Image (cartoon, rainbow, N blue to C red):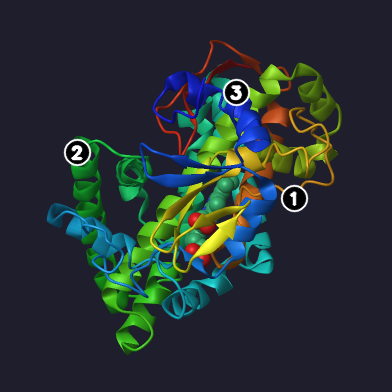
Amino acid sequence: MRFDPWNPEFVAHPYDVYDELRRERPVSFFEPTGQWLIARHADVNALLRDRRLGRSYLHVATHQEFGKPGDPEFQDPFWRVIRAGMLDVEPPVHTRLRRLVSKAFTPRMVEALRPKVARIAGELVDAFVERGGGDLISEVAEPLPVTVIAEMLGVPEADRHLLRPWSADICGMYELNPSVEAQHTAVRAAEEFSDYLIGLARSRRANPGDDLISALALVAEEGDKLTEEELVGTCVLLLNAGHEATVNVTGNGWWSLFRNPAELDRLRADHGLLPTAVEEMMRWDTPLQMFERWVLEDISVGGFDIPRGTEVALLFGSANRDPEVFADPDRLDVGRVDNPHISFGAGIHFCLGAPLARIELIESFGALLRRAPKLELAAEPVWGSGYVIRGLESIQVRV
Ligand code: HEM
């Protein structure tokens, strides 16, 4: 098999192909997307921190200067929302936007949320156990992070069911060469989500609560630190990034444990291993397989000259199995201590929500281990179609 992100077999198990890439072609040109694939941990890590690359080029050049056709006009509403969030901008705008919300996500701030996260996880798991099991994704993995981030931002309970479909549709645009239909679906979702948040922010500005949307709406009112468009972009980003990957780590993580029963037994016997186990599950079956960067100045990687105007695809899933960095990398080891995995990224865009994600994962795995000590797989799980954002569609289990 070759690197083929549109082939379900490759998506289900990309790791042998990664092995070959790391050994034989650690830097290689991938014709179908016109990107350079970067397979080794050292290169992925270095490029994420290299300011000669960026998530966007629009702060230093126009589409024309980069020889790109630009986005089709129908996508305008999508990019207006997405490029108003910190993930798709570079300094100085990135620095300003990240500073505005980073206070809410420091390890100390999110540690204070732990009892609440534990309570929500406990309630979800209790109900799940009472039913005798079911689909772990839709009944536990999804509702936990969605509830937590929605509560932080102050999205009313009655509207929360809207978040997951909007987010999933928006994420469709991030897959490699998305279909025209997926592009239209993403644009529509971005428009609806944006309209919804504008309404919510305006009502909070008039009537503030103790939540992040109110806080940002008040900052936006002052005018110079945050525009209304940036407020919406920030909230869309937080609500999407705040649950997508966490859902996938939960599903992929349980599936990893079921495939490695000795490690599951080890974790069952010692819940104190949860912090290292969560990091290891994020490494062993990486939820976000690939991130892209634009080359803003000519660079050289592994002996290849990569010119300005090119895109590199950083293969996180491959970096996380690199034997140069991880001892016995294909082994799932829930007690692995030396684990510099790249799943939260690196450099200025390093995941803002990492401390929160860690708490959510430890509390959700912990609640299931305690209250369903004999949890077992009821059917072979099925991978979703995404490669970049890679997770199981469902995972049926019995308690
Ligand atoms: C296990 C779960 C998670 C994983 C694996 C993950 C992974 C990542 C990665 C890899 C990036 C950087 C992307 C890049 O450099 O191109 C990122 C950025 C980000 N993540 Fe997460 N994330 C997770 C959970 C969360 C949560 C719970 C939040 C909650 C708010 C969050 C918010 C963000 C934000 C705001 C950014 C953009 C940071 C910036 O551009 O400066 N993430 N995440």
**Taking the image as drawn, is residue 267 in sight?**
yes
Mark 3 or 2, closer to the camera: 2
Q: Residue 100 carries which label?
A: none
Expressed as whole percent of the image width and height from the top left, the position of residue 196 reads: 24, 58
**Taking the image as drawn, is residue 243 in sight?**
no
Residue highlighted by disc 1: 340
The residue positioned 36% from the left and 41% from the top of the image is 33
Q: Rate crowding at label 2 as few (under 14), some (14 to 19) or many (20 or more) other CA atoms within 10 Å.
A: few
Expressed as whole percent of the image width and height from the top left, the position of residue 360 reads: 62, 47
Q: Earlier in the sequence, mark 2 or mark 1?
A: 2
Q: Which of marks 3 and 1 is nearer the N terminus?
A: 3
Q: Residue 129 carries which label?
A: 3
**Residue 223 position (above or below residue 70):** below
Q: Quadrant of residue 352?
A: bottom right
Q: Say which amino acid is labelled 3.
A: Val
The residue positioned 24% from the left and 56% from the top of the image is 78
Instruction: Tell me the distance, in whole angstroms, between the alpha carbons under discs 2 and 1.
Output: 38 Å
Instruction: Tell me the distance, in whole angstroms, between the alpha carbons under discs 3 and 1.
Output: 34 Å
Q: Say which amino acid is labelled 1.
A: Pro
Q: Earlier in the sequence, mark 3 or mark 2?
A: 3
**Residue 275 position (above or below residue 353):** above
